[in-house]
Amino acid sequence: MINKNNKDIVTIENITDLNLKETLNCGQCFRWEETADGEFKGVVKNKVVTASMNGTTFILKGATNNDLVTVWADYFDTSRNYKKIQELLGDVHPTLKKAIAYAPGIRILKQEPWEALCSFIISQNNNIPRIKGIIKSLCELYGDKIDNENYSFPTPFKLIRAREADLEPIKSGFRAKYILDAVKKVGTGEVNFQQMKTMPLEEAREYLMQINGVGPKVADCVLLYGLQRLECFPIDVWMKRAMKTLFPDVEDYTEFGKYAGVAQQYIFHYSRMHPELFDEE
DNA sequence: GTCCAGGTTTTTA
DNA sequence: TAAAAACATGGA
């Protein structure tokens, strides 16, 4: 049910299983900031918005009704039944059930694939505050200005003439050449996201890994967060530890089924919030 | 000064 | 083939 209250505040009623803090601070996205009043401000596709929840009412300030339909409802995956996914996953493993109960408001956002690719190239051997900082600088340097303080994520076209030295101000370090290889291959169409939507998973991973600086983990992140391949299960240092310590009886992530990627997000967040679980290794 | 961060590539044995 | 080392940068 979509309501239009006035010209720049729009709402969606009856949204369950969406907690903005859990969803936007769980390491899947890097362009949202929490404001002093607990709202979240972010940029997607040239649109700036301030999001908040009031009970089960999802509130978007600074958006038109048209934006709501064409951008935000989709981005927040509002039509998917997460309750059902949680039930399916909870039955797979008791520890997973616990992780779900810890943060049941996590959703997998539908990010733009190019932004997900760049973001997770930048994420390698890096920490989340720095990843956010580098992405912000990249947007300010090469994105389109939206208003006084916000910039869009630069397209491959905007970056196509950039050289390594040009990226020096964003301080991405050794990752700059990887970003530029991605720019080149996506910009020329050598790598095409549309094709990846229907490729078998393993083929899509290999396809992405032709980009220099994209290994299995970054590829999985792009497929999960950018192309809605919810069966993808990115394994980073946290997930490695989590599988070993919390799921010693799980042979392989495919035991989590077609929503393994959603399971991964619950487990990742739960692990990051409970580092003491891994103290003795 | 040393260690580490949602990894990947390059070098070495 | 497999295991180290290197890779930029900044905060703890």
Image: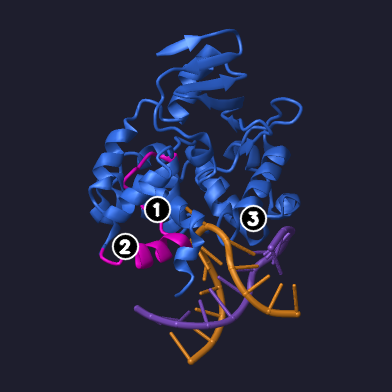
Chain colours: A blue, B orange, C purple
Compared with A167, A79 (above or below) is above
| Chain ID at mark 3 | A
- Give the structural element (helix, strand or loop) at label 2: loop
Give how far apart the Cα atoms at labels 1 and 2 are. 10 Å
Which residue is labeled 2 in the image? A247
Could you tell which of marks 2 and 3 lies nearer the N-terminus?
A: 3
Left or right of A166 on screen, residue A32: left
Name the residue located 52 percent from the left edge and 26 percent from the top edge: A53
Name the residue located 31 percent from the left edge and 49 percent from the top edge: A97
Could you tell which of marks 1 and 3 lies nearer the N-terminus?
A: 3
Left or right of A47 on screen, residue A225: left
- Give the structural element (helix, strand or loop) at label 3: helix
Amino acid bearing label 1: Ile
Residues shaded magenta: A226-249
Do callouts 1 and 3 point to residues on the same chain? yes
Where residue A237 appears, x then y in whole percent?
A: 47, 64
Is residue A155 on the magenta stretch? no
Give how far apart the Cα atoms at labels 1 and 3 are. 30 Å
Amino acid bearing label 3: Ala
Q: Tell me, yes or no, whether the two marked residues, 1 and 2, touch with CB atoms within 8 Å.
A: yes
Where residue A234 appears, x then y in whole percent?
A: 40, 54
Q: How many marks?
A: 3
Viewer can see residue A114: no
Q: Tell me, yes or no, whether the two marked residues, 2 and 3, touch with CB atoms within 8 Å.
A: no
Which residue is labeled 3 in the image? A176
